[in-house]
Image: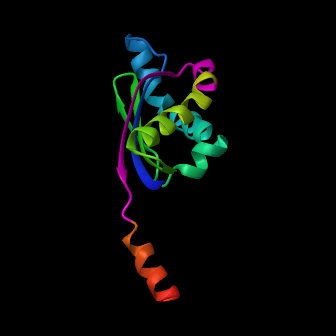
Amino acid sequence: MKDYEVNTAVLFHTGFNDGECNRLMFEGMKEKIIEDIRSAFEKDGTLSQNITSNLDFTFSGYKVKVEYAFSCHDENEAEAESFSNYCLQNIRQGLEEQGYTMEKVTCEASEMDMTWLDRMEEIWFG
């Protein structure tokens, strides 16, 4: 098994629809949207333990993209990507109940550079 970093992006629709009133209200709701989504990620034990970066939020229209790095120990890149996606399913229902729909999940895994660990083991164990 190897260590992988999975660059993950999740696109959420926020439940708002087009309309002038909604556009004005939406601007004031962005902080709440960020807090709702961040809170769901932090409350899930597996996600919070495996996310190794900040959650980066980008708004486009009434959608928000959340990007982060997810680290795990797995057999191969495909399994690491699948595990990252699977962990998101644990928070899907709760977020949908709040009006946030996951529209797209993108996971791209790469093997983590563990040469620093090899060097440390060589120093410690000779």
Q: Residue at x 58, y 43 (%)?
A: 47
Q: Position of residue 13 (x, y in %)?
A: 44, 21
Q: Residue at x 39, y 19 (%)?
A: 23
| Membership of 98 in magenta stretch | yes
How many numbered tags mark residues here?
0
Dividing the picture into quadrants, the one containing residue 115 is bottom left
| Membership of 72 in magenta stretch | no
Answer above or below: position of 61 versus 1.
Answer: above
Q: Position of residue 61 (x, y in %)?
A: 34, 23
Dividing the picture into quadrants, the one containing residue 22 is top left
Foreground of the two, 98 or 87: 87
How is colour applied across the structure in the image? Answer: rainbow
- Side of 33 where 60 appears, left or right: left
Answer above or below: position of 91 versus 57.
Answer: above
Dividing the picture into quadrants, the one containing residue 89 is top right
Q: Is residue 32 visible?
A: no
Foreground of the two, 29 or 12: 12
Q: Position of residue 16 (x, y in %)?
A: 46, 16
Foreground of the two, 56 or 108: 108
Q: Is residue 30 visible?
A: yes
Q: Which residues are magenta?
A: 94-113
Answer above or below: position of 34 versus 104.
Answer: below
Q: Position of residue 79 (x, y in %)?
A: 45, 39
